[in-house]
Amino acid sequence: MQTSLTAKPISARVLWTGRILSYLAVLFLLMDSFGKIMKDARSLEATVSLGYTEGIIPVLGVLILICTLLYLMPKTSVLGAILLTGYLGGAVASNLRVDSPLFSHVLFPVYLGIFIWVGLYLRSKTLRQMIPVQAA
């Protein structure tokens, strides 16, 4: 008998799906953070167009990098996901404020957040224990 505190064993297919979703999100976040830290011209232009000053952009890059590294480590992955969710919420607000296109710019951080959380859910037994999903 399964209680609410136990989870079914994770299949290899589900685990790899979770890893792939997570790593796709991490790949984008690392590219974004390094672009900001290294002051890449495209990254600077895109961030300045959202109303941020050039001086704050490397700080944003370091913040994204720290949150992403927390997400990558199993013991701190939930904390990393929570922090990244907050950062991505700010990205949505920033894009809304400057009237960016909805599906390509405003909602892109939402898509990334879905990859982060679904990926973590599929690869983390602990998270699946905390948030059980019952099949209909």
Image (tube, rainbow, N blue to C red):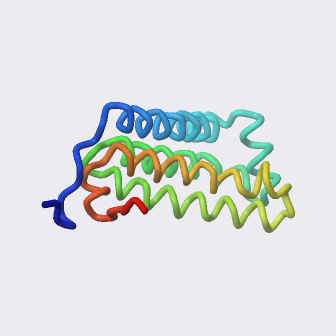
Residue 85 in percent (x, y) is at 52, 60
Q: Going by the picture, which residue comes out furthest to the left?
A: 1
Query: Left or right of 51: which side holds 135?
Result: left
Query: Left or right of 45: which side holds 13?
Result: left
> Residue drawn 43% across and 47% down?
66
Position of the C terminus, as image quadrant, is bottom left
Q: Nearer the viewer, residue 18 or 46?
A: 18
Q: Going by the picture, which residue comes out furthest to the front?
A: 136
Position of the N terminus, as image quadrant, is bottom left
Residue 65 in percent (x, y) is at 48, 44
Query: Left or right of 97: which side holds 130?
Result: left
Residue 106 in percent (x, y) is at 75, 58
Query: Left or right of 21: which side holds 127?
Result: left
> Residue drawn 77% across and 60% down?
95
Q: Nearer the viewer, residue 75 or 31?
A: 75
Counting every numbered tag in the picture gives 0
Q: Is residue 73 above or below residue 100?
A: above
Q: Is residue 23 above or below residue 121?
A: above
> Residue drawn 47% across and 33% down?
20
Q: Nearer the viewer, residue 31 or 8?
A: 8
Residue 88 in percent (x, y) is at 59, 58
